[in-house]
Image (tube, helix red, strand yellow):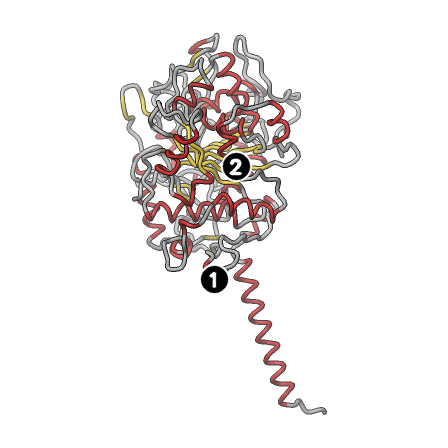
Amino acid sequence: MRHISVVEVVMAIAILALFIVFELTYRISFDSVDFRHQALDGNKPFICRIWPDLPELDPIAPTYTHCPGTINSPHLGDLSVLGSRQQCIGATARLAQYHELAGRNWSGVKWGEVQSRCASINHNLEFHEGSMHQRWQEPVRPQDQENRSGRNVRKTAVVLRAWDNYEYTATRLTWLRALISEVSLQRHDGYRVFFLVNIKDPELQLEENPSVYETALKKYVPEEFRDIALLFNERTLKSWYEQIPQHGAQDQMYQALQIFSHKFPEYSYVWQLEMDLRFTSHIFDSLAASSAHAKAQGRRNLWERNGRFYIPALHNGSYEDFTETVDSEIGDSGIWGPVATSDFVPRGPQQPLRTERDWGVGEEADLISFMPMIDPIGTNWVYETEVHGFQDGEKTPRRAAIISVTRCSRRLLRLVHDAQRQRGQWLVSEATLETFSLLHGLKAVTVPHPIIFASDLTPRDLDLAVHKGPSSNKAGGEMPSMLYSKQGWVSGPWWEASYWFTGNGAQTVWESYKGGAQLPPMLLHPVKEK
């Protein structure tokens, strides 16, 4: 038998050490990827550095760990719809690296340039950032739209809705840096992030006077975000939509987004996120998972599913059982294609025969929302009668969903744009995209994300509290508790909900998350942290 020499032993130990280093490096690089999402959207692990020459300063992509299941079952929604319910991301390590730490000069970062560099690595088609503000201020020419539409590349923009007096505190800056990094830099098919900044002074000539625009940009937007920020005011919106009397953010949240889609038609889809929205998960992964869920939905009784909450305790935790329940209640009487109204020409796809039960499966959604899309007629909602320019007036078929956190297609934004400019047709923000999707026969999907309440209602009591309408529109009906009525607030569980348009529930959950709680993927709104 040959004896092993000391040199051979040393070499074997060295090789083993190198293998361990390689294994640890591999895990650090790839453990942050949720492979469930990879199967859903085909994204590959990808990191683009903020400081290419100083890799030691770059934030590390958050790492998924096993979830102990601190929320075994939400009151509403599916724990798996935003990502794997068994994987969590801790807040401390995730967010701390975006603080004002020594050696990290955030004011020297230009997020537009960083995103362009990362996109060029990805081989995505990109415009030059230096022309962004120029494009935003120039009149749109039809040939530009055709040349830039990129119809063979389905690009996605993520637009954050800001305003001039928004306070960019250290805590908020930390969140925004994390959001841009997770959305745009840490996945192979990253999205592009923009800020749409509402300037409250309606007299500022932002389009006509470049120096006025530049002064406002420097005054209201931190230096690191200026090359991704686009400014507008009511003067801007009035010049585009002269037939519409309302241009405020509360009533016309989507007018600026419609203009954005015209100026940058290369984006097939646009996510609109609010500054007080928070994610307990990797943001890109949750947006991609939401898109995958919407794409997988068939159109049969889709509007009827959209019109109610999924209460998992009533369906043995099975969304498939929920779908079957809706189908058994509705049968073949549900909405199929565009809903007719007078003097309105639908421009969506032609619906097939009802025997094609899988219609819509695999079709991208023109609209994704995170709250039920209900029929506002008969609800006593404060905006119930706000429908203008339609021949059928208040009898016009409609849908509405509170909280304008959505993903919409370029096609849908263009249809709303045409209706407002050419026919003077409009509704309030919460009913705009939903109603035009309904009337044009476009695919719209409510993503049943997890929502929790402070009150410990039984599933049956919760069902009674949130469902007051008929089977076709269960979350609607008279005086739904999630809406603000003409008589004021409606009694219900929503004040401490993790997702609503007001209340303290989201803030409480977010503080718990930042305090170390391990939570599954969740959307939280509103979080008013300073």
| The C terminus lies in quadrant | top left
Q: Name the foreground residue: 412 vs 322.
A: 412
Quadrant assignment, res 414: top right
**Callout 1: 10 Å neighbours few (<14), some, many (20+)?**
few
Who comes first in sequence, dot 2 or dot 1?
A: 1
Residue sitting at the far right: 1
Q: Name the foreground residue: 65 vs 354.
A: 65
Residue at the location (59% across, 44% down)? 41
x, y percent for residue 146:
63, 27
Q: Name the foreground residue: 477 vs 223.
A: 223
> Is there any visible trace of residue 320 in the rendered image?
no
x, y percent for residue 465:
35, 30
| Helix, strand or loop under label 1 | helix
Q: Is residue 148 left or right of residue 255?
A: right
Q: CA distance from mark 2 to mark 1?
A: 29 Å
From what the image shows, is residue 505 above or below residue 443?
below
| Residue where numbered disc 2 is placed | 157
Q: Which mark is residue 56?
A: 1
Q: Identify which amino acid the numbered label 1 is placed on.
A: Glu
Can you tell which of label 2 and label 1 is closer to the viewer?
1
Q: Identify which amino acid the numbered label 2 is placed on.
A: Ala
| Helix, strand or loop under label 2 | strand
> Is there any visible trace of residue 439 in the rendered image?
yes
